[in-house]
Image: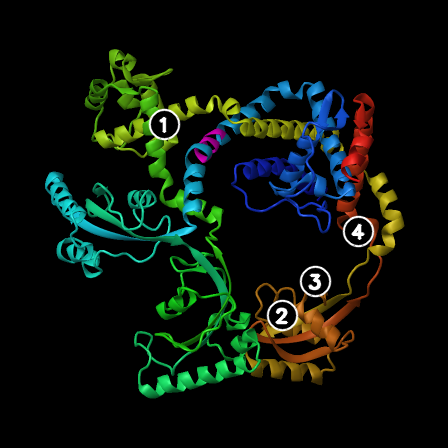
C-alpha cells in the first residue's frame, strides 16, 4: 500500500514537468493551482514599472531577478499578463522561498554530476526530439495562420461569385470564358444578371451570385484572402482557381465588409399545437392564433414587471427555459453560437437581433417563426468573440496538413532541393511491385551500384538509396505505403520531411529563446526528479517503530464502522419467499432451520454452499445492513421478505459488531499517507537545510520591501 502511494507521488512529480512543457507549447488547457493571489482591488496587468534585472535573491552564484521570478510565477498560475508587483507581499515571499528551494535542488544535482549521467542525457535528448517538431510547426505554421484568422473574425463580409466549371482536362476554355465575363463586368455589365445567366453553379444562379454573410474560415481560402485585400464594390482583378470536388474558376466581387457583432441575451419560445416535425407552423389558423395569444399574454406580464428570466422559466417551451432563457454563449449572424453549438435562431429572430440601430437592453415584440412565437431581449454585445483555442483546433483539423506541405515546399526551394528521377525510376524497376510492402528480400534485389546512388539532396543533406531502403524497413510510419510510383513517392516525401524538420530544428534554441528556456526547464525538472529519487523517495521506507510513534497520539481518531453479520435466502418467487418465511416463524426463527433452507432454496450464485451467510458489512455502504439498522433488528431477528436486486430477500441478523478503536495494524491504511507526508517533509527539510549551508542564500530584503510595501 505504501509502495503504491510512493509510486503515485513520484509519477505525478515527473508529470508536472511534462505538463509544464505542454503549457509552454499551448497544448494544455487547465491551469495549475496556486495559493498566491493578486492584491485585492489591483488589476493584474497594471503595476508600477520594475526593472526586470533587479536582483531579489541570490542562490550560490545564481541571481534571481524580478523578471525570472515573475516569469516563473506566471507559469505557475498560467497567466501570461500577470504583474508580479501587484501580488501580495506574503504570496510573493512564499513563492520566492519555493523557487529558492527549486534552484538549490538543481545546483545540488549539477554539483553531483547528475546532468552528465548517460540515462539523463538520453532522456533530455529524446524529449527534445519529441517536442522540437511540434514547436517548430506551432511557431512557423499554426500561430501565424491562427493569428490572422482570429483578427479576421472581428469582421464579416459578403461576396458575389460567378463560377465556371472546368470540363475534362481543358482548363484553357474555362479560363478564357471567365476572363471574358470579367472584362464585361469591368465595363459595367450587371453582376447579378450575369450570375443568374452564366454561372455553372446552381446556388449562385438562383441567388444572383450573392453569398450570405460569412466570416473567416467559412469560404475557400483564396476567396477569403482576396476579399480582405479589396474595397466594397470592387471586382477581384483575376479569376480564382478552385480545385475542390468540382474544379473551376470564380469571379469575385466584394459586396460588404463590416464589423462582426456578437450578442448575448435571453429568449422565450411559445410553440403552436403539437404538429409533425416536418410541417411548418401553423398546421391550421387556430394553432397560430392560440400561440400568439399565449405569447402576447407573456409579453404583457413582462411589461407589467415580471422578470424576463422568471417568465422564461415559467412559460418558455425550450431546452434553455430552465436557465431563464439565456443564450448559452455569444451569438453572431455568421456562425450562430460561439461555443460550438450547431443550433441557429430562425431567420426572423436573427433579423431582429442584428437590425441596424438595435441597442442592448431592447426587448422584441412577439416574433412569428417556423418554430413558434419568440420574445427576445438583447442584453450585451461585442465585436468578434471567438476563442483563439477553438480557432486553432479548427485550423489543425482542416488546414494544417495542406499548409505543412506548402511550408515544406518553400523550405525545399530555399534549400535547393533536387530529386534524381532516374534513380527513383531505377529503384521502382528493381522492386517487385506486386508485393504488398518493402522487405529485406526486396532490398536484396537492389544492386550495390544502385544502393550507393543519390535519390535526392538539399543543402547539408544527401539521401542515398541504401538509407531510403533502410527507412522503409525500420520506420513503422512507412510500412503502409504500396510499392507503386505513388506509394514510394509518398514514403520518400515523409523521409525528406523528416530530414528537413531535423535540419530546421537544430537551431531552435538560437532561433527561439523561449524554446531554449523550455528545454532548460525540462532539464532542471529531470535533475530534480532524479536527485529527489535518491535523497527522498529511496529513503521512504515504512518504519514500524516510527509509524507506531506517529500513531500513538492519534489512535483515538481511527475507529471501525458498525458492522452487521447476516444470512440471506434470495428467491425469485414471491409466493415461495412468503411460504419459507411462515415456516421460519412457525419454528421460532431457529438458526439451524434458516441455514438448511438457505442451503436448499437460495438462488444467489455461490451462496447455497455458504448457507446464505455474508461477511460482516457496514450499514453506511450496503443496503441489507442499512435495512437491519433502520429496523432496529436484534440478533436472531428475521426480516419479512422484501424486494432486493430483482428478487425477494429473507434476512436473518446473526451478529452486530459495535464501533471500536482500530488496532495499529488495522489503522495503517488510514494514517499511512499522512505519515508518509510527514517523513517526506522531514527528509526534505533536512536536505534543504544542508543545501542552504553549502550554497549561500541571500534575500535582498530592502529591495523586496521597496517593491512590495
**Earlier sequence position, callout 2 versus callout 4:** 2
Q: Does the magenta stretch include residue 439?
A: no
Contact (Cβ within 8 Å) of mark 4 with mark 3:
no
Gap in angstroms between the C-alphas marked 4 and 3? 20 Å
Q: Which mark is residue 599?
A: 2
Q: Residue at x 43, y 37 (%)?
A: 144
Q: Residue 380 vs residue 165: left or right?
A: right
Q: Which residue is drawn at 33% across and 42% down?
A: 229
Q: Please tell me whether mark 1 sits on a helix, a strand or a loop.
A: helix
Q: Please tell me whether mark 2 sits on a helix, a strand or a loop.
A: helix
Q: Nearer the viewer, residue 648 or 482?
A: 482
Q: Residue at x 37, y 52 (%)?
A: 215
Q: How crowded is mark 4: few (under 14 residues within 10 Å), some or many (20 or more)?
A: some
Q: Residues within 10 Å of mark 1 (few under 14, many from 20)?
A: some
Question: What is the span of residues highlighted in magenta in the rendered image?
Answer: 132-138
Q: In this view, does 423 lie above or below 239?
A: above
Q: Is residue 134 magenta?
A: yes
Residue assigned mark 1 = 497
**Earlier sequence position, callout 4 versus callout 1:** 1
Residue assigned mark 4 = 667
Q: Residue 420 vs residue 301: left or right?
A: left
Locate the N terminus and report the quarter of the image it occupies: top right
Q: Which mark is residue 615?
A: 3
**Earlier sequence position, callout 2 versus callout 3:** 2
Give the main secondary structure of the magenta stretch. Answer: helix
Amino acid at each position: 500500500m505504501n509502495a503504491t502511494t510512493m509510486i503515485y507521488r513520484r509519477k505525478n512529480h515527473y508529470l508536472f514537468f511534462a505538463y509544464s512543457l505542454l503549457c509552454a507549447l499551448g497544448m494544455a488547457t487547465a491551469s495549475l493551482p496556486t495559493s498566491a493571489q493578486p492584491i485585492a482591488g489591483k488589476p493584474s496587468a497594471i503595476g508600477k514599472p520594475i526593472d526586470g534585472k533587479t536582483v531579489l535573491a541570490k542562490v550560490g552564484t545564481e541571481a534571481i531577478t524580478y523578471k525570472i521570478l515573475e516569469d516563473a510565477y506566471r507559469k505557475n498560475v498560467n497567466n501570461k499578463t500577470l504583474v508580479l508587483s501587484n501580488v501580495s507581499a506574503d504570496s510573493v515571499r512564499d513563492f520566492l522561498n519555493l523557487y529558492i528551494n527549486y534552484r538549490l535542488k538543481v545546483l545540488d544535482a549539477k554539483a553531483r554530476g547528475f546532468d552528465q549521467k548517460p540515462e539523463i542525457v538520453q532522456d533530455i535528448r529524446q524529449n527534445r526530439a519529441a517536442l522540437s517538431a511540434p514547436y517548430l510547426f506551432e511557431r512557423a505554421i499554426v500561430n501565424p495562420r491562427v493569428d490572422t484568422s482570429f483578427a479576421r473574425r472581428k469582421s464579416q463580409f459578403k461576396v458575389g461569385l460567378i463560377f465556371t466549371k472546368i470540363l475534362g482536362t481543358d482548363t484553357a476554355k474555362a479560363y478564357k470564358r471567365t476572363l471574358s465575363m470579367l472584362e464585361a463586368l469591368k465595363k459595367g455589365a450587371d453582376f447579378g444578371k450575369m450570375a443568374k445567366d452564366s454561372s455553372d453553379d446552381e446556388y449562385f444562379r438562383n441567388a444572383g451570385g450573392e453569398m450570405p454573410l460569412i466570416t473567416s474560415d467559412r469560404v475557400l481560402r483564396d476567396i477569403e484572402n482576396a476579399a480582405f485585400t479589396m474595397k466594397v464594390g470592387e471586382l477581384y482583378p483575376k479569376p480564382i482557381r478552385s480545385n475542390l470536388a468540382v474544379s473551376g474558376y470564380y469571379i469575385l466581387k466584394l459586396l460588404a465588409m463590416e464589423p462582426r457583432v456578437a450578442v448575448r441575451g435571453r429568449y422565450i419560445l411559445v410553440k403552436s399545437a403539437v404538429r409533425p416535425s416536418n410541417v411548418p407552423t401553423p398546421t391550421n389558423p387556430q394553432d397560430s392564433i392560440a400561440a400568439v395569444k399565449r405569447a402576447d399574454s407573456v409579453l404583457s406580464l413582462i411589461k407589467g414587471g415580471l422578470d424576463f428570466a422568471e417568465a422564461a422559466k415559467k412559460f418558455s417551451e425550450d431546452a434553455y427555459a430552465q436557465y431563464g432563457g439565456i443564450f448559452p454563449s455569444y451569438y453572431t449572424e455568421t456562425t450562430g453560437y460561439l461555443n460550438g453549438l450547431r443550433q441557429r435562431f430562425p431567420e426572423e429572430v436573427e433579423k431582429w437581433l442584428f437590425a441596424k440601430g438595435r441597442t442592448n437592453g431592447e426587448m422584441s415584440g412577439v416574433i412569428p417563426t417556423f418554430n413558434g412565437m419568440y420574445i427576445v431581449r438583447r442584453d450585451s454585445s461585442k465585436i468578434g468573440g471567438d476563442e483563439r483555442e477553438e480557432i486553432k483546433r479548427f485550423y489543425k483539423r482542416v488546414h494544417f496538413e495542406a499548409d505543412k506541405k506548402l511550408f515544406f515546399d518553400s523550405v525545399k526551394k530555399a534549400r535547393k532541393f533536387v530529386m534524381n528521377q532516374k534513380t527513383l525510376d531505377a529503384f521502382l524497376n528493381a522492386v517487385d511491385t506486386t508485393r504488398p510492402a518493402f522487405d529485406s528480400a526486396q532490398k536484396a534485389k537492389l544492386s550495390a551500384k544502385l544502393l550507393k546512388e543519390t535519390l535526392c539532396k538539399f543543402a547539408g543533406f544527401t539521401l542515398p538509396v541504401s538509407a531510403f531502403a533502410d527507412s522503409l524497413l525500420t520506420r513503422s510510419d512507412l510500412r503502409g505505403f504500396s510499392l507503386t510510383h505513388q506509394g514510394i513517392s509518398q514514403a520518400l516525401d515523409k523521409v525528406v520531411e523528416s530530414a528537413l524538420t531535423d535540419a530546421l530544428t537544430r537551431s531552435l534554441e538560437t532561433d527561439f529563446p523561449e524554446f531554449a528556456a523550455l528545454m532548460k526547464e525540462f532539464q532542471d525538472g529531470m535533475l530534480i526528479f532524479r536527485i529527489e529519487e535518491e535523497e527522498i523517495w529511496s529513503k521512504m521506507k515504512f518504519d514500524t517503530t516510527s509509524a507506531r510513534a506517529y500513531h500513538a497520539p492519534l489512535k483515538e481518531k481511527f475507529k471501525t464502522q458498525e458492522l452487521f453479520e447476516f444470512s440471506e435466502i434470495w428467491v425469485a418467487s414471491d409466493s415461495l419467499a412468503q411460504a419459507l418465511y411462515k415456516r421460519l416463524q412457525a419454528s421460532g426463527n431457529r438458526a439451524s432451520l434458516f441455514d438448511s433452507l438457505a442451503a436448499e432454496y437460495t438462488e444467489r450464485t455461490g451462496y447455497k454452499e455458504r448457507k446464505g451467510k455474508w461477511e460482516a458489512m457496514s450499514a453506511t455502504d450496503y443496503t441489507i445492513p442499512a435495512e437491519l439498522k433502520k429496523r432496529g433488528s436484534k440478533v436472531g431477528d428475521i426480516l419479512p421478505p422484501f424486494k432486493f436486486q430483482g428478487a425477494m430477500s429473507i434476512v436473518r441478523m446473526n451478529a452486530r459488531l459495535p464501533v471500536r478503536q482500530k488496532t495499529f495494524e488495522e489503522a495503517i491504511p488510514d494514517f499511512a499517507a499522512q505519515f508518509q507526508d510527514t517523513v517526506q517533509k522531514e527528509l526534505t527539510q533536512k536536505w534543504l537545510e544542508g543545501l542552504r549551508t553549502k550554497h549561500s542564500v541571500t534575500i535582498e530584503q530592502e529591495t523586496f520591501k521597496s517593491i512590495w510595501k
